[in-house]
Amino acid sequence: MDVIYRNIDSLEQSERIKKLKVQLFEEKRFASIEQARIITEVYQQNPGKPANILRAMAIRASLERIQIRIDPGELIVGNRTAGIRAGVIFPESGLSWVNDEIETLPTREQDRFEVKPEDIEVFRRDILTYWQGRTLEDVLNERIGDEMKAIGKVAKINQTDHAQGHICPDTPSWLKYGPAGIADMARRYRERNAEKASFYEGVEMAMQGASAFMKRYADLAEELSENPAYDADEMRRTAQICGKLAVAPPDTFHEAVQCAWFLYVLLQMESNASSFAPGRMDQYLYPYYRRDIDEGRLTDAQALDIIESLYVKFNQIVYLRSSSSARYFAGFPIGFNVAVGGQDENGEDASNELSYLFLRAQEHLRLPQPNLSARVFSGSPHHFLKRCAQVIGCGSGMPQLFNDDAVIPALMNKGISEADARNYAIVGCVELTTMGNSLGWSDAAMFNLVKALELAINDGKCMLTGKQMGARTGTLEDMETYEDVEKAFRTQIDFFFDRMIRCCEVVEKAHAELLPSPLLSGVIDGCLEKGIDVTAGGARYNLSGIQAIQCANIADSLAALKTLVYDEKQVDRAELHKALLNNFEGEELLKLRLLNKAPKYGNDVEWVDEIANKWIEYFADQFKGYTNARGGIYHAGLYTVSAHVPMGKNVGATPDGRGAGQPLADGGMSAVYGRDMKGPTALLRSVSRVNSRLGSNGTLLNMKFLPSLFQTDEGVEKFVGLIRAFVKLKIIHVQFNVVNKEDLLAAQKNPELYRSLTIRVAGYTAYFTELAKDLQSEIIARTSYGTI
């Protein structure tokens, strides 16, 4: 097998793929109102029907009417718009922000889209007027808008203006039955369950739309076979594949990949949400690949061409967010997360030829999507780890690594069966999930622990505005002992926690009421059997994840207070409190003392690292006794996406020496940028002291290395050793940027020369030049390691 893998590692990229990649950069991004018009017409023409039926009718009409397109050379076809990387305006979830921002979409700081003037007119005349007061956003603003604003600087409530994504559908079952088979299944369930007929009718209707969508692509491909700009044989083959998938499941590898891609397009069209994750593609596609190879229908070169065609398609879909949301999720992180490697159902190595083909595709293309993840464990073969290291060294930030030896116990600790835990996948950036049977609601909220600490030492008042936000706990000047600080911190966490949970419950119930998902429910195990929509608890597992932000700043700040204020008494607490209120103005020496004289998280200082673990444990323990609206549990995540920048803007100066408004630590487990001074192994040891079971919703560790490390076999082998250490220390996740600081500075200065430069942000990869300047600068400031 080693010879086969090495042959795969040397496969070349085809000219076809090179041309398709170039096209991604040549077409402008436009905001699209086409589907919004179709959905609005359906709702206007069918008043009084149940929400799930309206949603099913809307997705079916969209699939039957939306403009479609096939480009020359495409082996995998399908998109939710005719335009590449279009920003879809989706009426059911929220339009108020669109109305406020539509003219500024082409000029805003982050994630820009062109807008046609005539579309603005149609949007306001035909779409907005119908939906005002009816959208998820409007309903939630009426029900809990004031409460969300009141707690928002500490607890940011998510999922308020878009439908639910961040889910891994049951792609294996989709491949087994296809839309026609699932529609037939829903019809049979409906005949036996009259009381739940509406649910099954919705699923059947949505699947009929899916079949119609595939048939339309078959018809278009057949038509294009007569066009001299297209390869006639390829178009006829595409027509045959799409026509077959409309009525029957796939048999070949090419058919299976095309069928899987159709599913992710369909789910995007139903809900316009981020991260419908393909999951473990190297596992469920392997039987199709192996059969085609054995029967002589497929070569590895042909399989790679198909996979790389799929990779290009992953990059043709982006997600239009509000300007505020775009700062928290900067760079279009759509989250097509593909996992390779890991364990099989018996705990043995599951890597196969497809694992290496997916790695080779990433090595060739280096695009932001898919968000490629490699599952590793103590039994991972050396060659698999080495290939991961070599691909990481190419600089695209992928694959990110997930440690089975930490993830599987963390999931089982939350009630996931061993079989499902071993078959885990990743959604979005780093969120952990089971395959095809869970709605993890992994991005329910973000809790800014650093803001809570600010309020704890300032009597519950915001240091930036003077506004009373939290409980009255006294100021730092009043706190005679370090334990007094801890008590105040606990009080502020408790003050916001219950209010946050109550808001999350209202959001979940509103999703079930307004945005049931009949198509998604057809591909989540448990929904058809129960006759319950996925948003209402139909899945086997129903979790909700809330992120704790940011353990490094908390550890550094409390370590500085404990050391310099209370133990060594080098700093007067009244003077420090005044300096914090004034953002260290005139107190530069005090700021330097806080920065340089107190130990910092990320440097293998056990007692400092234990501070981080203590407060993450306290936060995670607060979930006990709460259940979400679907009857499932809450659990904690430790990641920020790009929220560490805007959340930092909401936090005043902190006792670790950070200035007011400055970014918080990136990632979720990472040290504050520039403070991990003892090297990569010391950082890993610090991170390992935060119990991985506390981050069962997902954790994120960023590390940055210089490209020179990967230019020799010795350097690559050292990096493999670092991966082995990561596994042994039972850390859930790590990801790497491999880039020179000089290249990033040059790209910031001359973005037009670096359009294809990708960078790891926080659990996802984005084009560096498409990020706002403050986020670019934060990435540049992260510590770089030149050796191990």
Image (cartoon, rainbow, N blue to C red):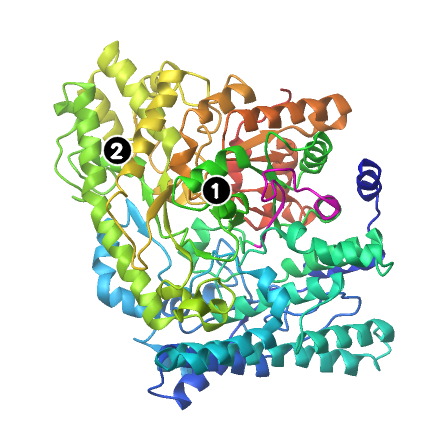
Q: Is residue 31 left or right of residue 540?
A: right
Write the residue at 61% across / 26% down: 724
Which three-letter amino acid code belongs to the residue tagged 2?
Answer: Leu
The magenta region covers 336-356
Q: Is residue 87 above or below residue 503?
A: below
Q: Camera-side residue: 579 or 201?
A: 201
| Closer mark to the observer between disc 2 and disc 1 | 2
Q: According to the image, label 1 marks what residue? A: 774
Q: Is residue 712 left or right of residue 621?
A: right
Q: Within the image, what quadrant is residue 448 found in? A: top left
Write the residue at 68% across / 49% down: 756
Residue 662 appears in the rendering: no
- Structural crowding at the residue carrying mark 1, measured as other residues with C-alpha within 10 Å and reported as few (<14), some (14–19) or many (≥20): few
Q: According to the image, label 2 marks what residue? A: 453
Badge number at residue 378: none
Report if residue 352 lies within the magenta region.
yes
